Every structure is written in structure tokens, then in C-alpha cells.
């Protein structure tokens, strides 16, 4: 059994070790703070030196602070600096749900990724608005004009009429997840990972809404209002409805002409109808839009000489062409089927407006709480969309008439 002197000696040793541990912990905390400041100073120096990334010093600093916040979520100093720079960058915008603002540079990269995967977002007119109540006046091109001789009197002519298009908006949100070890690894490209992950998720959500969204807390898709057979019918159809041309078959296109189909069964007839149903100024910059399943069917068609009707591109990154017009793939487009509209053709820059809200995107970090060992990043942003000019695009419908 230990004597009192032995017990006292052991207590003294334990206390001495505890004091040493406290000292070491304090030194470690101080070293961590110095390292964090050194990281930030390096980034600021690079920004002042004109880093070759196209960013201004302020943008570079915002991106760096944002990245450091994701790596060191509990660092109150970094978050405070991030909030301070946000107040200048965000121009007074706020978010009741909190979170931090994604830097404009990274947000643009995320939407670039989404647009690469979502043809409609890339082809449509893209605008940034500060209000969800914005309206776009669309000229219906119905003004009249009169010829007169020199010195003849001039009377008034009919003025053009306008219709207003108001995009419907909604907040799209989702989560991306990474391990806390991965985010903390200095060799891991946090910016690139977040850009790709969020861009992929945005493509899925936005792509579907721009084609078929019902306008309820989301964009109104270009096919939300069923296309009609006659835009000049009486009474006039919904001004958000496109024209359609039928394939002549209830649930498909016609037969491959190389397989011996007669002219009445030639599947290309409806594609010619679609082209010439648009005015010359609208088809000048027109594009075919379809999903991969539809493109796979058309890619097998040959003319009577065995040549492919859908011409593949001879250059990487360039789209294929069909009857001289480029083909874009958007997986949100409907499949071939009864009463479906598997192909669109038109100048989508005129036909559709895709709107991003200037409030940007905010991110909140769920750090190792919901699932231990994993960091969930909750992001949200507001986008909208609406058909702008119903006569600038046409749909092909799988139908007899």
C-alpha cells in the first residue's frame, strides 16, 4: 500500500502533466490561428499580385474565405470575415434561413456546369433579376405600315401590341455530402468538387422544370401548356402554347425510307413540316431539341442512298445536325410515345426566358451532426422561367392528326 508521501508525489506528478498539457494545447491553438492567418495572407498576396484566374482581388478574397469556411467550419474568425465581405458583395440581399453566400465567381461556374448538362438553360435567353415580380413585354409584331409618295400626307398606322410575360419562380434546394476528412485535406479541391456537385444537382432540377415545370413554386416549362394544332384558331389558344405538327402515327414516327417505306410513311416529312412552320427569321438560328432515346432512333435512319439523316459532328464538342440544323440533347425532353412531344424545333433564345434571382445562392453546413463523420452542405437558390414567344418554336407530336 502506498504511503501518504508516495500518494502526494503521484498527485504532484499528475498536476505537473496537466499543466504541461494545458500549455501545449494553448501553444497548439496559437499555432493554428497563425497558420490560418498565413493562409489568408498568401491568398490576399496572390490576389494583389494579379492571379491569372480572371478574378478581382475582392472576388479572390471572397472565394478564399468561403473555401476556408468549408474547411474550418468552427472558425468564428473566418466566418466573421466572410460575413463582412458578403455585406458588400451581396448588395443588401439577405436570407432569413441564414447560411453564407456563394461567391459570384463560383456561382457562375456552378450554373455553367448545369447549362452544359441542360440544353434549354443554355439555349434560352438568360437574365438576372432582382424581383420575382418582373415582367417582360413581348412585341407581337402586328404593327401596320403604309407606302406613300414624296410630299403625300401621312396618316396614323396601327401600333404594335405587346403581351407581358412574367416568369414563375421557385427556390431549388438540395444537399451535397462529403466526409469531414476530405474537406479538411489541403490537397482536396473543395471549389472544384462543390462546383461540379452543385452543378450536377442543379442540372437535374432546373432541366426538368424548364421543359415540363408546372409553374407552382418552379419555372413554367416550355411544354407545360399543351401545344396546339393551330395558333390562329378562333377562339385563340392559350398564348403560352406552342404549335405542334403531327407525325401521322399515334405513338411513333414513320418508317425508315431506306427500309422501303412509301413517301407517306417517310418519317422525315414531319421534320420538314416543323422547319417550314416557322417564319424565316425564327428558323435562321433554330435548333432541334430531343433526349438521347429519341436521338438514338433518328440516328438509325438512312436515306435511299444509305446516308445517315442525322449527321454526326466531325469535331469534338460540336453538335450533330439534322436537315442542316444543329441537334441539342436535353434529357428532360419526353420520350417517343402516344400524344408525346419528343422533339422541339425553334429559336429558343426568342421562345423562352430563363431567369436567375440576384440573391444568388446560400449554403448552410450541417457539420457532423445528422450523420457522424460526414458534412452535409445545404444549398438553395431561386430561378424562374416562362415561354416568351410561342411562334418562335414548334413541337413534333406523336399523333395521327
Image: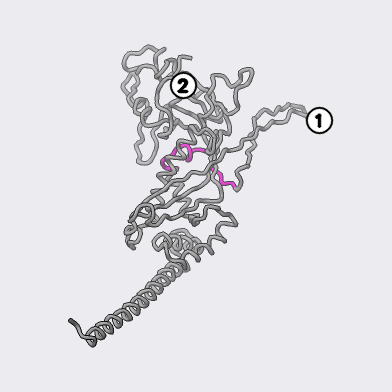
Q: Does residue 1 appear anywhere in the picture?
A: yes
Q: Which mark is residue 397?
A: 2
Q: Is residue 227 left or right of residue 152?
A: left
Q: Residue at x 46, y 50 (%)?
A: 379
Vertical arrangement, residue 8 with respect to residue 66, above or below? below
Determine if the magenta segment contains residue 150: no
- Return the residue at label 1: 151
Q: Residue at x 36, y 29 (%)?
A: 293
Numbered range of the magenta stretch: 115-129
Q: Assign the N terminus to one quadrant of the image.
A: bottom left
275 vs 137, nearest the viewer: 137
Q: Secondary structure at mark 2?
A: strand
CA gap, disc 2 to disc 1?
A: 53 Å
48 vs 314, nearest the viewer: 48
Q: Residue at x 42, y 19 (%)?
A: 338
Vertical arrangement, residue 194 with respect to residue 213, above or below? below
Amino acid at each position: 500500500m502506498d504511503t501518504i508521501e508516495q500518494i502526494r508525489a503521484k498527485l504532484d506528478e499528475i498536476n505537473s502533466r496537466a499543466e504541461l498539457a494545458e500549455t501545449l494545447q494553448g501553444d497548439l491553438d496559437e499555432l493554428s490561428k497563425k497558420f490560418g492567418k498565413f493562409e489568408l495572407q498568401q491568398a490576399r498576396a496572390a490576389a494583389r499580385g494579379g492571379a491569372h484566374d480572371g478574378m478581382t482581388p475582392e472576388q479572390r478574397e471572397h472565394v478564399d474565405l468561403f473555401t476556408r469556411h468549408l474547411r474550418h467550419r468552427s472558425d468564428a474568425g473566418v466566418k466573421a470575415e466572410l460575413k463582412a465581405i458578403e455585406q458588400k458583395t451581396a448588395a443588401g440581399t439577405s436570407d432569413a434561413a441564414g447560411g453564407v453566400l456563394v461567391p459570384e465567381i463560383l456561382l457562375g461556374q456552378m450554373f455553367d456546369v448545369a447549362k452544359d448538362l441542360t440544353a434549354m438553360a443554355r439555349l434560352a435567353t438568360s437574365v438576372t433579376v432582382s424581383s420575382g415580380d418582373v415582367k417582360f413585354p413581348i412585341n407581337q409584331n402586328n404593327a401596320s405600315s403604309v407606302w406613300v409618295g414624296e410630299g403625300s400626307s401621312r396618316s396614323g398606322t396601327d401600333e404594335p401590341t405587346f403581351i407581358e410575360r412574367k416568369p414563375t419562380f421557385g427556390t431549388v434546394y438540395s444537399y451535397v455530402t462529403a466526409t469531414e476528412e476530405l474537406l479538411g485535406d489541403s490537397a482536396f479541391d473543395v471549389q472544384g468538387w462543390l462546383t461540379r456537385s452543385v452543378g450536377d444537382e442543379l442540372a437535374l432540377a432546373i432541366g426538368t422544370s424548364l421543359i415540363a415545370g408546372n409553374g407552382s413554386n418552379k419555372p413554367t416549362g416550355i411544354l407545360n401548356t399543351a401545344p396546339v394544332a393551330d395558333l390562329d384558331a378562333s377562339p385563340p389558344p392559350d398564348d403560352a402554347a406552342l404549335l405542334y405538327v403531327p407525325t401521322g402515327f399515334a405513338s411513333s414516327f414513320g418508317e425508315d425510307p431506306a427500309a422501303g417505306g412509301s413517301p407517306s410513311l417517310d418519317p422525315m416529312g414531319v421534320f420538314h413540316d416543323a422547319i417550314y412552320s416557322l417564319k424565316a427569321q425564327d428558323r435562321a438560328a433554330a435548333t432541334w431539341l430531343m433526349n438521347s432515346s429519341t436521338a438514338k432512333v433518328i440516328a438509325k435512319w438512312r436515306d435511299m442512298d444509305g446516308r445517315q439523316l442525322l449527321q454526326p459532328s466531325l469535331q469534338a464538342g460540336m453538335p450533330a445536325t439534322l436537315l442542316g440544323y444543329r441537334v441539342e440533347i436535353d434529357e428532360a425532353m419526353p420520350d417517343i410515345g402516344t400524344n408525346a412531344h419528343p422533339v422541339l424545333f425553334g429559336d429558343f433564345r426568342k421562345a423562352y426566358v430563363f431567369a436567375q434571382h440576384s440573391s444568388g445562392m446560400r449554403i448552410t453546413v450541417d457539420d457532423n451532426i445528422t450523420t457522424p463523420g460526414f458534412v452535409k452542405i445545404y444549398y438553395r437558390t431561386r430561378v424562374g422561367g416562362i415561354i416568351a414567344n410561342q411562334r418562335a418554336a414548334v413541337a413534333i407530336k406523336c399523333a395521327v392528326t
